Image: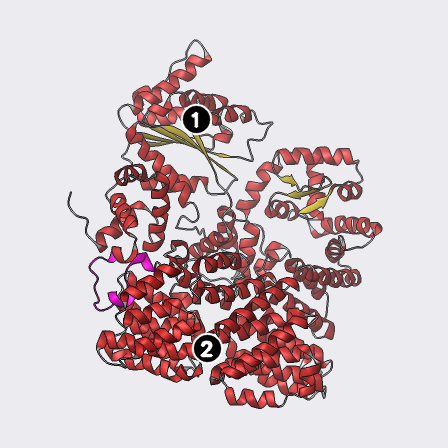
Amino acid sequence: MMAPMASQGLSRSVFERLADRTGGGARSRDGMITRPISCRRLIGRQRERAFLIERRRDLGKGNGGIVLIAGDAGIGKSRLVREFLDATGGARGRVAIGRCRQYTGRPYEPIVELLAAFAPESAYVPPAPSQNEQLAAHAEALLAASRKHALVGVVEDLHWGDLGTLLVLTSLAERIATSRILIVATYRSPELHPDHPLFVPLANLLRSPSVAQIELAPLTSDETSSFITATLENAEISPDARREVARVAEGNPFFLEELLRSTLAARGTRDRAVKLPTTIRGAIHERIERLEADDRAILTQAAVIGRRFDIGILAHSMGVDLSEALSALQRAHALQLIEETGDPVTFRFRHALTREAIYGDLLAAQAQPLHRRIASVLEARGADERTLDALAYHWWATGDREKTLIYGERAGDFARTVHEYAGAVAAYERALALLDPQRRDAARILVKIGATCFRAGLMDRAIDCFEIAWRFFRETGDDPAFLCRLVRDFAGALFNDGRAGEALELWREAIDVIIATGNRSVADIARATYATYLIDGGYVEETAAVLAAVDATSIEADPATALAYLSTNCMTAALTGDRERLRSSAARLCAVGERVAESVLSCTDIGQAGVFALYTGETDVARNCIALSVDNAVAYRASVAAIGDLMLARADVETSCGEYLAARAIFHRARAMLSEVKLSRFYLTHIALAIGIALDDGELLALEPDAAMLREAFATGKPPIFGPLAGFSGQIRAARGDITGARHLLRDAVTAAAAAPTSLGTFPLVVSAAQCCAQSEADAVRFLCARDAGKGRAPAAAAALVDAIFRRRFGFGDATAADAAAAGFADVGWPLYEALAREAGGRRDVAREIRGRIGYVGLAGAASADARSTSDETADPLAALLTSRELEIARLVARGSTNREAATALNVSVKLVEQRLSSIFVKLRVRSRSQLAAHVASLAALPEE
C-alpha cells in the first residue's frame, strides 16, 4: 500500500480553485474584508544573507565592494536587504538607504541621499568641468566618508535610476576594494532588458572584480511550503488551497503573501469567485501598459489561448499575418511578459499570473467569442493527442456541453496514460461541471478524478471523490470488477492518508456488496485484498478465515488474486512466527511477480511482504522481495512516488545491514520522487533519521519530526510507523542533552505500542527506550519485547539485547543475554545491533571494531546514547551534538570570529568552516550567528580568554 506521486498542480482557473477550497469560516453579506498578512521569518535566503553579512565583516579589514541583488518583482530583494541590515546592527549614521524613483528624481539622487546620511557636509557635490570628474567627485565623497567609519549603503530599485547613478557606482568600483564601504544595490532583472538605456552600463559594472551579484531564484517547493506555514501562523486553509497557492505563485514570496491574503478573505464571502489581488494586477499591468494597443490585443488573444500558445493559431484566430503577431510577441518578450519554449512556433507567458491578469480583465461576453474562434481553428486542424486538452478547454469556455464532454473525457484519459495527472484532473473536472451530479456519468467521472488524484498523491481529494462515487455505485450492484477496483483504490487512499481503520471498515462493508454480485473470481480477489487490511490491523484469525474462503482455482488462474493472497500469507506468517511459511510464500510470491504480464500489480504486494520479512529478520527474503518490487515498478511504469516508496524500503534494508553509504544514495533518489502522502512522509523521516544518526549527517538529521508530525504518526495507531520515529527522535533528544524529553517521548510510544495488537517492526523504539528509560519503566519495554520475541530471529535477538542493556544499567536480567543477542543479530546480518549487544556485554573493543567496519559514526561520534542516559545532565551538551571540529568552530564563531578568522585559527580552509557551520546550524536548530552565540552561552559557558 505504497503512496503515489506528488501533485503538480491542477489547471482550472486559479482563483476559482482557491475559492472552492478555502474551507469554513463565517459568511458575510457584503463581500470580502482583507487584512495584510506577511511572513515574519526569512525563508530560503540564508546563504545570500550569510554572504552579505560576511561582506560586511570584511569592511573591518578594509575590503569594500559592491553587491548587486537582482530578481523579479516580489522575489524578496528588499526583504533580504532588511534582514541583512537587521543582522548587522549598525550604529546610526553608518547604514543608509538611497532610493531610485520611477517617475521623479534629481540626478544622482540615491548617491546624494547616502551622502546626506554618511557625511551631511559633503551631500552637495558642486558641478565639475567634465562628466568623469563629476562621477569621480561623488565617488570620492563616499570613500572619504568611509575613512571615518565602516559604511553600508543601500541603493533600492536601480532599474529606475538615472544613468549618472550607475556611472558613479562604476567609478566607485575602481577604488572600493581597499575602502571600508559596502554598497548593496537592488534591481529587477526583467526591467533591464537589452533595449533599456542602463543595460550596457550595468554589464560594464558587473565586469569589475569588486562587484558581486546575487540573483534571487524562486523559492523551492520545500521553502514555499515553509513560507505558507509561517505566513498563515494560526490561520488555516484547506490542503488543496495550499497546493494551489504554491503552484500559482511559483516561488514568488510577494505573490504567495497576496494569494494567501485573498484566499483567507474569501472564506467569509458568499461569492466564492476570488479575484486576482489588486496588488498583483497592478504590478503586472505596470509592464503591460508599455505596449501599444495593437500589441495588447494580440497579447490578450494569446492569454485566451492559454499560458502556452502556438503563434500560428494566434495569428489565424486574430486574422493577422504571422510577421505582425511575431513583432508584437517580440516586444512583449523584451518586457519579459512572455518567453520562448524551445519550439520556434510556441511561446508561453513567463508567469501564470501574467496570463491570469490579462485574461481576468475580459468579460464573459468578450471571452466566449474568442474561445469559439480558437476552438474552431483547432478543430479544423483535426483533433489529436496534442490538441485534445485545448479543444476540451475552449469548448468548455464557450459553454458547448456536447463537445466539452467528448473532448474533456478523451483529454483526461490521454493525460492519465502519460502520467500528466494535473492536466487529467482539469479535463475531467471540466466535463464533470456540465453533468447532472445525480447521474451515473457524473459518478463515473468522479471515479476517474479520484483514481488520478490517488496516483498524484492527493489523498484528501481522492477520498472525497471516491466517497461520493461509492455511495452511488454500491446501490447498483452491477459491474463487479469496477466495484472491486473502486473499493481497492478508495481503501488505498484512506490507508495512505493514515486512516487504516477507516480503510478496514470500508472493506468490511464492501466485501458483502461485491460477493452479492455473484461473480466468483472478483469476489476472490476482493477477499484476498480485504485480507491484507485485516492482517495489517493484526486480526490474525479473521485473516485466516477470509483467506480460507478464497478458491484455489482463482489463485492459480488470476495473478492479481495470487499476489494479494500470497502477500497476505507472508504477513500472517510474520505475525505468527511461522518462518518456513513466510519463506515459502515469499518464494511463490516472487515467482508470480516475475512472470505476470501486468507486473505493476505486484509492486506493492511484493514490497509489503518484503517489509514484513525484514521485521522478522529474514533479511535475504526482504532484499529479494523489495528488489523485485522496485524492478517491476520501474519496468511497468508505476507512479514515480510508488517507486520512491519502494526505494525507501530498499534503503531500509541497506540500513539494517550496515550499508549506510549505499542507503544514503538510495534515500536521496527516493526523496526526489515522493509525494506529500502522510505514510510516505513518515517512512521518509524514519529512514532519514536512521541514516543521519549512523553517519552524523546534518542534512538528514534536520528532518527530525516536529511535534505535529509525531502527533500524526501516533494517530495512525501503528507501532511500525510511530515506533521508529519516536525511537530515533528519542536518541537525538538524549544526545542534545534533553534526557527528560527523550524519556517522555519514548514512554508515550511504548505505551501506545502496547495498546496495539503487535509491535513488530519497532526495534529502534525498544532499543532506544531500554537505553534511556528509568528503571521503573523497564517492565513496559520488556513486555513489548516478550510479546513479539517468538515472531522471528530479529525480535528474539531484540528481546535479548534489551535484557542485556537492562542488566548493565540496572543489574537485573539474564547474564547470557548479551551473547545471545549478538549471535542473533550476527545471524540475521544486522551489524549495528550486534555492536550494541557486544557493548552491553562489556566487549567495547569488539563493538568499536564493528562500528568502524561499517562506517558508523553516531551522533557527533560520541559514545552510545545509553552511556549518556545514566544522568539527566551531561558534562557538555554541545559535545554530545557536535563533532570535535564543529565544537571548535562553534566556539570561535560564538565569540565573534568571521569564517576566515576561524579558518586561520584552526589552520583549515574557509570552505571547510562554511560547510561545518551549516551543519552546526542544523544540529543546534539555529538560523544565525547571533542565535548560535546565545545557544552556546546557554548550554556551555564559554571559557574566559
Percent across and percent down for residue 411 are 73, 59
Percent across and percent down for residue 688 are 43, 61
Three-letter code, disc 1: Pro
Q: Is residue 828 magenta?
A: no
Label 1 crowding class (10 Å Cα cut-off): few <14, some 14-19, many 20+?
A: few
Percent across and percent down for residue 171 are 43, 20
In the displayed orientation, state which residue is furthest to the left: 944
Residue designated by label 1? 209
Residue designated by label 2? 616
Cα separation between marks 1 and 2: 62 Å
Of marks 1 and 2, which one's residue comes earlier in the chain?
Answer: 1
Residue drawn 68% across the image and 61% down it: 424
Q: Nearer the viewer, residue 800 or 723?
A: 800
Residue drawn 45% across the image and 51% down it: 36
- Which mark, residue 920? none
Label 2 crowding class (10 Å Cα cut-off): few <14, some 14-19, many 20+?
A: many
Residue drawn 55% across the image and 27% down it: 199
Q: Quadrant of residue 767?
A: bottom left
- What SS does tag 1 mark? loop
- Segment colored magenta: 858-878
The quarter in which the N terminus is drawn is bottom right
The quarter in which the C terminus is drawn is top left
Q: Nearer the viewer, residue 234 or 419?
A: 419
Establish if 362 lies above or below 639.
Answer: above
- What SS does tag 2 mark? helix
Percent across and percent down for residue 700 are 41, 57
